[in-house]
Image (cartoon, rainbow, N blue to C red):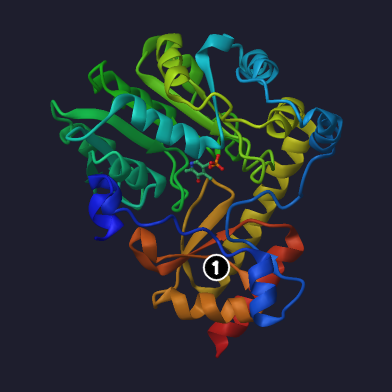
Amino acid sequence: MKFLDVANQGVKQLLPYQAGKPTEELERELGIHNIVKLASNENPFGLSETAKQAILKELNQLTRYPDSNGFYFKQAVANKFNLQANQITLGNGSNDLLELIAHTFASEGDEVIFSQYAFIVYPLVTQAINAKAVVVPAKNWGHDLDAFLANITDKTKLIYIANPNNPTGTFLTSAEIEAFLEKVPAHIIVVLDEAYTEFTDEQERVPSFALQKKFANLVVCRTLSKAYGLAGLRIGYAVSNPEIADLFNRVRQPFNCNSLALAAATAVIYDEEFLHKVADNNRKGMQQLVQFFEQQGLEYIPSKGNFITVDLKQPALPIYNALLHKGVIVRPIGGYGMPNHLRISIGLPEENQAFINALTEVLAN
Ligand SMILES: *Cc1c(COP(=O)(O)O)cnc(C)c1O
């Protein structure tokens, strides 16, 4: 007997998520120090002082279970964005929410729509529940929403949209999203995954919470992992119609967010100074990399996130490995069907420069 044979149908074909290589692992393998990691779209500044203080204060409470309802953090999110707390669902990272949404609304035989080159968690959660993935071919590396509409059937339950998208950094405007929502049947759940929204310019940002007043089937997912710098603590939030939030609340694990994450998130969500510093550094770092790519004549996909994807016009894996040996970790995205591209997260200016130097050397050889 093989345990594979008795596993759930959807799980049998599932492949594990490929995470960015941890710094410690590379240090062990190659004996290199001062490694620059630009592989997982993490915050280059480290933990904000506000988050750190909140965590230290919470340490004494760690023998207790966390607040199952995340009262204070929901309150903070509600206040910040002028929402009601009963619209908010918290997740152990927004990955947890993306999965929770699939479990709540789709099952075997249902169809889930997302784009080619979209965030890899969408196919993973779809496969895990043995639903049918409807992958819409990308247009200029981004979402082709007209093609999404053409793929809606009476089996469609769920649509995932990443805006900006990871790993391509492509972006849909407010007008494009709204025109799309107008045409989607009201019983189909549309998930707008806005993991990188804090890096976009405020004027161009999609007013997604306002759109929810008109489109009750719109679920917005956000995370504290990227701009807010809490990737290791695992916390994100979904904003939806209260009726939908009530359903999520039934399906989620009762203690899916830990006490330290709740405390840190409640503090940092109001830390506008930290957020501005992060966004400002990102803007400058993006310019630094774009300028380098243009000087080198390398083709890149214009990005609204905290990362940029470059087309090397040759297999990216050997170049990724050569960069590793120079102590720079970036992200190969062959798993996304982009074997000639590398994704580089924006770091501190000196980290970006280390990548620029390393790639220049590697390409010269
Ligand atoms: C990083 C990322 C997330 C967030 O992941 P967490 O689980 O919150 O750390 C969600 N969606 C996309 C598109 C991402 O790139």
Residue lying at 26% horizontally and 46% vertically, measured from the top left:
10
Q: Position of residue 365 (x, y in %)?
A: 55, 91
Please say if 6 is above or below 148: below
Please say if 103 is above or below 215: below
Q: Position of residue 271 (x, y in %)?
A: 77, 30
Look at mark 1 in the image and give the residue it sits on. 293
Return the residue found at the far front. 1
Residue lying at 45% horizontally and 38% vertically, measured from the top left:
163
Quarter of the figure with the N terminus: bottom left
Residue lying at 82% horizontally and 31% vertically, measured from the top left:
54
Q: Report the front residue among 125 and 301.
A: 125
Q: Report the front residue among 90 and 151.
A: 90
Quarter of the image for residue 22 reads: bottom right
Q: Helix or strand or loop: what does disc 1 sit on?
A: helix
Q: Can residue 144 be seen from the camera position used here?
A: no
Residue lying at 62% horizontally and 43% vertically, measured from the top left:
226
Side of 288 relative to 155 (left or right): right
Q: Position of residue 195 (x, y in %)?
A: 53, 38
The amino acid beneath tag 1 is Phe
Side of 35 relative to 131 (left or right): right
Q: Badge 1 local density, few (<14 within 10 Å), some, or many (20+)?
A: some
Cβ(mark 1) to ligand 1 < 8 Å?
Answer: no
Q: Can residue 93 be seen from the camera position used here?
A: yes
Side of 166 relative to 25 (left or right): left
Q: Position of residue 52 (x, y in %)?
A: 82, 38
Return the residue found at the far bottom. 365
